Image: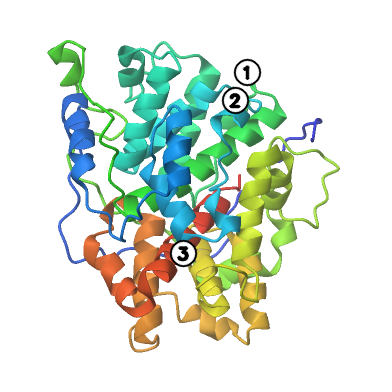
Amino acid sequence: MLKSISLICLGFFTAGPEVDLTSATPDRSAPTLTVDRDSMLKMLENSKRHKARLPLPEPTAKDRENAKAGTLGLVNNGLMRRYYLPADWSTAAFPARSQQSGLVDYAFKTELFWIISRLNNCAYCLGHQEAKLATAGRTEAQIAALDGDWADSDVATKAARTLAVLKTKSPDQPVPSEIWKDLSTKFNSDQQGEILLTIANYNAMNRWTGGLNIPQEEHREYQSKLASESTKKPSTVLGSSGKAGWSSRKLPDFASFMSSVNHPESAPGFVFESSDADRSVPSFRRLIKMQGTTGQARLKSWEGATKLEFAEGVNVPALLRGQILWYSARLDNAPQAASEARKMLKELGQTDADLQTLETLDDQKLDDKTLKVMQLVRLLTLNPAWVGDNDIKAVQAIYGDRATAQIVELACIAAAVDRLKP
């Protein structure tokens, strides 16, 4: 664990022209948001009737036995992960609740999960956090207040929630130093690292459960006991437009981004890093290694994704895995993650010119298989709420069920690691 703190307040963008690689929206209507609690709870009830975009596996005898022993019953997400994903990826970097105490209160982290799921419009995860917060002793009024009424929260709590919003909506941007300063009024350096890693992991999970449209379990109930005037208040976290706006990002141009990729050791560190931290190791790896079992699980998934050889249970070729990790890092402006993906791709014979062909998804430069995958990855990276049935079907028709699930999870792994930067 790193104990001493040194403030490293460096910008993350490389100086140079900016480009917008994200401006072209899909040819479809914007997803409708549920802007008040009443309509949100109806959405959660309706999510029980979601049709998973990949076949939902039948629970095994062991699954049923574990469900009886646990507090959550059968969990469709767990069924999907165990069935489709390699063992190194399937833990999702989330240990069992009994192991989740960590350094930061479990319920506090679950509140952050609720906020992130709300922003990503992920009904499955949002429903689970409603149930977990109630079990943890939060009243419905306290849960409802997460949707924007933070007036009674202390400075550090507001900072953590704001960090969750920033890392969800704008992971390409540096975090204002004031956020870290406010966090430090309550959370020490190790706790700040845990908060950042868990926010990153929650964004990854939303992309898996939401992207695959996993149905909510039938045994959960979503009905409000609050007065109707409370449940009709519009969310201030989402805004009141009623539509999920398309994310448009101004990113460094390719040459500027490559300058950062070529020198990942010069990327800024975290405000809570030790002054004697090994600068030869990317800051996201240093952070992950600080975070106990949760960090070990995330690092294992990242290292499994970047292996050149096929590991047991992996159905996605190394070249495609590297391209997914690279493209996600490019869209999230994460040069350290991109540097590791680039190293992987160079070992497979790819050049920087090959990487640049992914910039705009030009169908004249990319083969149809790669194009379909990258179009899905683009949605998962920028706007997971926009993913539709046909986006999954297009990849499924080429690669089959299991590889398609793993392609989605690769985008999730990337989404987490990309967010582990200042």
Residue 240 can be seen in this image: no
Q: Residues within 10 Å of mark 3 (few under 14, many from 20)?
A: many
How far from the left and from the top, in percent, is residue 364? 34, 89
Residue drawn 41% across the image and 25% down it: 132
Specify the amino acid type for callout 1: Lys
- In which quadrant is the N terminus drawn? top right
Between residues 280 and 64, which one lies in front from this camera angle?
A: 64
Crowd around label 2: few <14 · some 14–19 · many ≥20 (10 Å): many
Image position of 126 with respect to 71: above or below: below
Please identify the residue farthest to the front as the structure is shown.
61
Q: Quadrant of residue 275?
A: top right
Assign a secondary structure to mark 2: helix
- Image coordinates for residue 321, horizontal then vertical, percent: 53, 71
Return the residue found at the far right: 276
| Residue at image point 59% right, 85% down | 350
Q: Position of residue 349 (x, y in %)?
A: 63, 87
Q: Please name the residue that numbered disc 2 is placed on.
A: 183
Quadrant for the C terminus, please.
top right
Q: Determine which residue is flagged by label 1.
A: 186
Residue 415 position within the rendered picture, expressed as x and y whole percent measured from the top left: 49, 54
Amino acid at dot 3: Gln
Are discs 2 and 1 less than 8 Å apart at CB?
Answer: yes
Looking at the rendered image, the disc whose residue lies closer to the viewer, 3 or 2, is 3
Q: Earlier in the sequence, mark 3 or mark 1?
A: 1
Disc 3 target residue: 406
Residue located at (68% from left, 81% from top): 347
Figure check: 54 above or below 38: below
The CA distance from mark 2 to mark 1 is 6 Å
Q: Say whether marks 3 and 1 touch (CB < 8 Å).
A: no
Q: CA distance from mark 3 to mark 1?
A: 38 Å
Left or right placement of residue 87 versus residue 164 in this view = right
